[in-house]
Amino acid sequence: MNVSFSWLRQYVPVQMTAEYLAECLTMAGLEVDGLYERYDFLKDIRVGRILDVERHPQADNLSVCRVDIGTDTVSVVCGAPNVRRGMTSALAMPGAVLPDGTTIQKTVIRGQASSGMLCSESELSIGPDAGGIMDLSDTLRPGASLNVALQLSDTVLDIDLTPNRPDCLSMIGIAREAAAIQAVPMSIPEIQLPDAPGDIHSMTSVTIEAPDLCPRYAARLLENITIEPSPFWLQDRLLSVGLRPINNIVDVTNFVMLETGQPLHAFDFDRLSGHRIIVRTASEGERFKTLDGKERLLSDQMLMICDDSTPVAIGGIMGGYDSEIISKTRRVLLESACFNPSSIRKTAKKLGLNSDASHRFERGVDPDGTLYALNRAAQLILDISKGATLVGGLIDQHPGKPDTRIVTLDIQKTNTLLGTSLQGDVISKILQSVGFTIQRSTDKTLEVAVPSYRVDVTRPVDLVEEVARLYGYDKIQTTYPLIPAQKRSISPLFDLRRKIKQLLTGVGFTEALNYSFISKHSCERLNLPEDDPRQRFIHILNPLSEDQSVMRTSLVPGLLETMRGNLANQVKNLKLFEIGKTFISTGKDQLPVETEMITGLWTGLKHTPRWDTKDIVCDFYDLKGIVEVLLDGLNIPRVRFTLTPNEHCRYMRPGYTADIYTEKNRIGRIGEIHPRVLRNYDIKQTGYIFEINVSDLVTCIPAEKKAAPVPKFPAVTRDITIIVSKDIEANGILQFFEGQREKFIENIHLFDVYEGDPIPDTKKSLSIRITYRSTTGTLEDKVVNDIHTAVSERLLAEFEATLPA
């Protein structure tokens, strides 16, 4: 919203500079993005005194003038009929840029040098006179900048309004705020329409067939209109805020919209079939040509303004091509209406059509300001259009008249929320300064009547906000929350997240943060079957893009997209992890199942490339080691990895995937990314991932930490090598030793696996090292040998194993 400082002063006596007003408005919630001086270009226009005027030797209609600019005398070729010796005028110096974009340069006109241009009022956009150069007072000093000499100044404020303040999309709305800031009264133009003959109801009518979309529609009829350019003052007001003048009728409607915030529309009455207005919704598939010459495809949810046979405007957005004001227009029907904001917003978005009118209607206009804006426009047209007359009466269809909103404000609660100690009379004065009315007041409450133009105020907390911004945020004392002295325990889940991040970053992983929204095709890329719970998506009603249309049911797609993006940028060595929630739908209008997961990904080299080491690509066991470090750091005992059945390996490679178990239950899965999934994501590099349910981890962490003394006595190790079937997992053999409950067995470690000659094809060789130790004394060889022999015999029997030959 652009606000001309000089225009604003027509409604309120602004007693501060534009810069300070901008600061005050910003502190009151109306952020001023910037200021600019409208007449700044006049600094390159100088006051010049014409010393001599001679006829141009090669052109009868041109004169060569010698002009004094204070510090120098320059020669200027001029064609103005009123130029004379001794005259003081405006001289545009070389380099000056005129309002129409013309850049003045030194030139030669028919053999005579010209170092500037003597200008008319019209050429400088500071007056309507285009018949000759400006005739300035002889008291002005030659060489002075024209804006200083004529004291021309008009600062324009660029205000960035939030959608909840449509009342400030007008000069009067901003004036109301400025008046409240200064505690001075404001005034709005009085309307005095003449007594007019005739009756509008006998000449036209308005029928509202969609009252839910158009709660009010008012109209006036003017005759004997002459279409011509607007007077200079009106054009100047529009230009001051960046609007282009068109003609006297359209300019008035635009001026009143900017002044009051109420959009208006002018119809050529003689081009309306049946000379009547019908407000209805469009037919599905109906086509309509708007003022910009484009044909629009309509739906049955869009509001249309129609005559007796066809649509003539899209309600609240843009008029029709066949009912616009033209040079032959002699009778004008003025429309001032109130439309449903959500209907206008949906229509404008669907048609991709935004206008100054739709910008205001879709935020909400003042329903009680409809008639004032209509009458104001009628009066201005009568004032500026030669011979224009008003038809008596007006049409005001108001089927959706709202009741006055009364909001009860609790004084004590207001002070509690704001941290103030304001009395009720002070709060009343603050609210009344911007148009609120106090219907009834007590020591504890205020019953506040909300003005119709404040469509954003519906609750007590809205009034509290008004009190805060108008009282002054800078006047509210800064306080700090009370912090209890007693210690409070941290949430176990919060503490667990922090610990996980510390452990994984400690082994070289980097945390990734992805959106909780993914593509609905993500699970197809993961090869998940249709009955998989992760196919039950929660769809986003208004997604930012197709790739973010559903809530994620797995963290894997996000990490794979991150991997693809990094590989595309030649970052081929990645160690990433992410902690976040997944969302599984449980049905329409039901809360989803939210599960917190941690997912890790490793691809590329095992170590950072160095001159003294070979490049080794990471593998399954590297990532398995990371998971073991993580779980060991969380003090989770007895973790085991079991081969995942092939039918469960949807996005991990069969035979290279394992389920992760604690002594209680399964908590996750680890494996190599399936080659088909890599192709689906256009990834050409092998990677490994793990997934762990964070919620399950909480139940696995011991409540107490236990410590053991440093062993005093030496350990004894024994190795055993056995040959078993390839189908037997080494993990099962290690668990067998743990189940023997031999008090002297301290540790079991698999240190070698061998397949090949001379081992049969269906067999493999496993070498296991067992550590024995006693806490009460040094073990003798005989005791260790007896235990080791007994355990070995049971091992061979349990797994049908044999010893090497």
Image: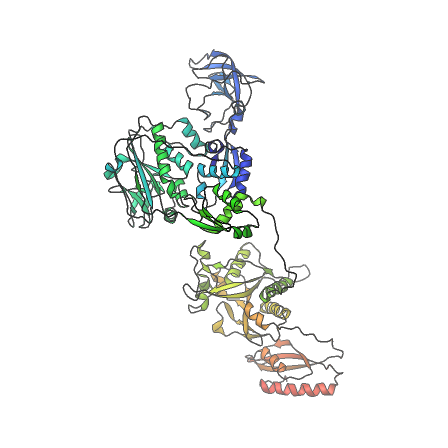
Residue 650 as seen in the image, left or right of residue 640 = left
At 41% from the left edge and 29% from the top edge, which residue is drawn?
A: 235
Residue 693 at x, y percent in the picture: 54, 68
Q: Position of residue 6 (x, y in %)?
A: 48, 31
Can you see residue 580?
yes
Camera-side residue: 51 or 223?
223
Residue depicted at 55% across the width and 47% down the height: 422
Q: Nearer the viewer, residue 589 or 537?
A: 589
Quadrant of image for the C terminus: bottom right
- Image quarter for residue 687? bottom right
278 or 444: which is nearer to us?
444
* 711 horizontally vs 109: left or right: right
Q: Determine which quarter of the picture holds residue 127.
A: top left
In the foreground, 216 or 404:
404
Q: Position of residue 267 (x, y in %)?
A: 31, 36
Say above or below: 118 vs 587.
Answer: above
**Residue 703 left/right relative to 248:** right
| Location of residue 538 with respect to 269 vertically, above or below | below
Q: Is residue 474 left or right of residue 297?
A: right
Determine if residue 1 is in view. no
Q: Residue at x 47, y 59 (%)?
A: 518
Q: Is residue 263 above or below residue 710?
A: above
Q: Which residue of the protein is positioned furthest toward the front in this rendering?
A: 442
